[in-house]
Amino acid sequence: MKTILVVDDEKRLVSLIKAYLTDAGFNVVTAYNGRDALFVAREAKPDLIILDIMMPELDGHDFMRIHRKERNTPIILLTAKVEENDRILGLELGADDYVTKPFSPREIVARVKAVMRRIGRSDTPLPQLLRVQDLELDPDSYVVNHAGERVDLTRSEFDLLHIFMQSPGRAFSRVELLDKLQGTVIEGYERTIDVHIKNIRAKIEENPRSPRYIETVYGVGYRLIPT
């Protein structure tokens, strides 16, 4: 049984999310601020974290900065609709997805299942080592090397680069990438792809403003330059 950590200072909201996730077959642990969430995460080692940004003691961004140094747990952010800059910062810090408040608890369950499906793919046979230019990606070990040096990617960043490296030269739209990455498309979430691309470029490009690997195809989306 997969364990989900739900972190939010609104206790009624935490109880509601917990009830829906429990009904969906997940084990749920909870915390009501970022500081307590660090202790719970270290003890329970959850498979996924649902994290509010605005919290007392330690906010969601600071929690992510600390937790990412310890584990690479997939994270879904809970954000208010007006918090676009906070949402983007969360994605830049390595969040895998976000859900805006107010939301349906069923949407939370759907987003969790989508991320968990992606995690489960690592348990199934995958293609051999992929090489494009001086990038190497090993689907079995979830390792990426750039010019012989290891690159630390979040789960979503790895999955996105994997999509590109399976079809070098092919242009993907943001909607198509979002569908492949999350298994569903919700209007307005295409911005998530832009932030993940920005993060990947910062890690593999010598000059992210003049990319050698992932280029923007204007009017379409992105593609991986094959040579």
Image (cartoon, rainbow, N blue to C red):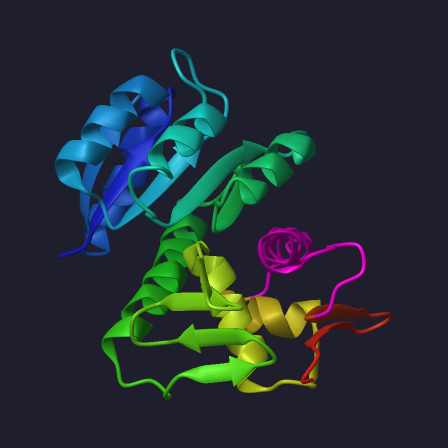
Could one spot residue 33 in this view of the protein?
no
| 132 lies left or right of 106 | right
Q: Nearer the viewer, residue 160 or 181?
A: 160
Judge whether residue 200 is colored magenta: yes
The image quadrant that residue 213 belongs to is bottom right
Residue 220 rendering spot, x and y as whole percentages = 80, 74
| 145 lies left or right of 18 | right
Tell me the quarter of the image containing the N terminus: bottom left
Is residue 156 depicted above or below 85 in this figure? below
Residue stretch in magenta: 185-212
The image quadrant that residue 79 belongs to is top right
Name the residue at 36% across, 54% down: 112
Could one spot residue 68 in this view of the protein?
yes
The image quadrant that residue 25 belongs to is bottom left
Judge whether residue 193 is colored magenta: yes
Residue 198 rendering spot, x and y as whole percentages = 67, 53
Residue 148 rendering spot, x and y as whole percentages = 47, 68
Residue 167 rendering spot, x and y as whole percentages = 59, 86
